[in-house]
Amino acid sequence: SVFAKNMTDPKAERTFIAIKPDGVQRGLIGDIIKRFEQKGYKLVAGKLMWAPKELLMNHYKDLADKPFYNGLVAYMASGPVFAMVWEGKAVVATGRKILGATNPLDSAPGTIRGDYCIDVGRNICHGSDAVETAQREIALWFKDDELNDYEFADKKWIYE
Ligand code: GDP
Ligand code: MG
């Protein structure tokens, strides 16, 4: 479901991660998925989707008064996005670390943005910035029946 079944279980935290149109065009879907998989996070949902402008405007509504907002929505609407939900302990904050700082010139090497991009307006990926934001974004991008509840076979090898 949209909300992980047991919200008291820290391993059930979920985040919304998206590979933006430039990341899709540049062939980075596999590498970005690989980094989250290798860390030990569980993929709950994923789809390639050419997002309608209304969805993107809603997704970025908190930035509506920024000078780059229209350009940001146009960039996000310029091609399909690979939208995902990842689950695991502290996945929201850790997911942001895996992506790297918003401005790729400040993103550490070893992060996705640090390794693959230069301009803030072409920073190839999105990650929710808080647990509440993640819940809003997951509900915005996914239908309830697109979220897969399943037991991760590796779980006992990843968590103590
Ligand atoms: P994020 O949470 O790290 O993605 O950063 P924000 O929520 O602050 O901004 C959302 C997205 O807007 C960023 O990922 C960038 O693609 C874009 N963005 C942020 N700041 C700027 C800016 O100063 N100029 C441009 N062109 N785009 C920006
Ligand atoms: Mg943000």
Image: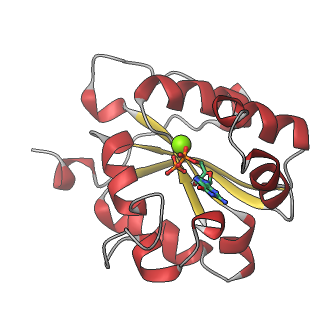
In the image, residue 60 above or below residue 99: above
Q: How many marks?
A: 0
Q: Percent position (x, y) of residue 100?
A: 39, 62
In the image, residue 34 above or below residue 3: below
Q: Percent position (x, y) of residue 76?
A: 78, 56
Q: How is the image coloured?
A: secondary structure
Q: Which quarter of the figure is the C terminus placed in?
A: top left
User: Quick check: 159 left or right of 134?
Assistant: left
Q: Say which quarter of the image contains residue 110.
A: bottom left
Check the image and name the residue furthest to the left: 160
Q: Relative to the observer, which residue lies in front, 124 or 30?
A: 124
User: Quick check: 8 left or right of 6?
Assistant: left
Please say whether residue 142 is visible from this viewpoint: no
Q: Percent position (x, y) of residue 23?
A: 65, 72
Q: Relative to the observer, which residue lies in front, 80 or 47?
A: 80
In the image, residue 73 above or below residue 102: above
**Which residue sits at x=48%, y=63%?**
103
Q: Percent position (x, y) of residue 54?
A: 88, 35
**Which residue sits at x=37%, y=68%?**
106
User: Quick check: 131 left or right of 65?
Assistant: left
Q: Which quarter of the figure is the N terminus placed in?
A: top right
User: Quick check: 133 left or right of 78?
Assistant: left
Please say whether residue 46 is visible from this viewpoint: yes
In the image, residue 98 above or below residue 56: below
Q: Relative to the observer, which residue lies in front, 49 or 59?
A: 59
Check the image and name the residue furthest to the front: 67
**Which residue sits at x=75%, y=66%?**
21
Q: Relative to the observer, which residue lies in front, 68 or 142?
A: 68
**Which residue sits at x=31%, y=57%?**
40
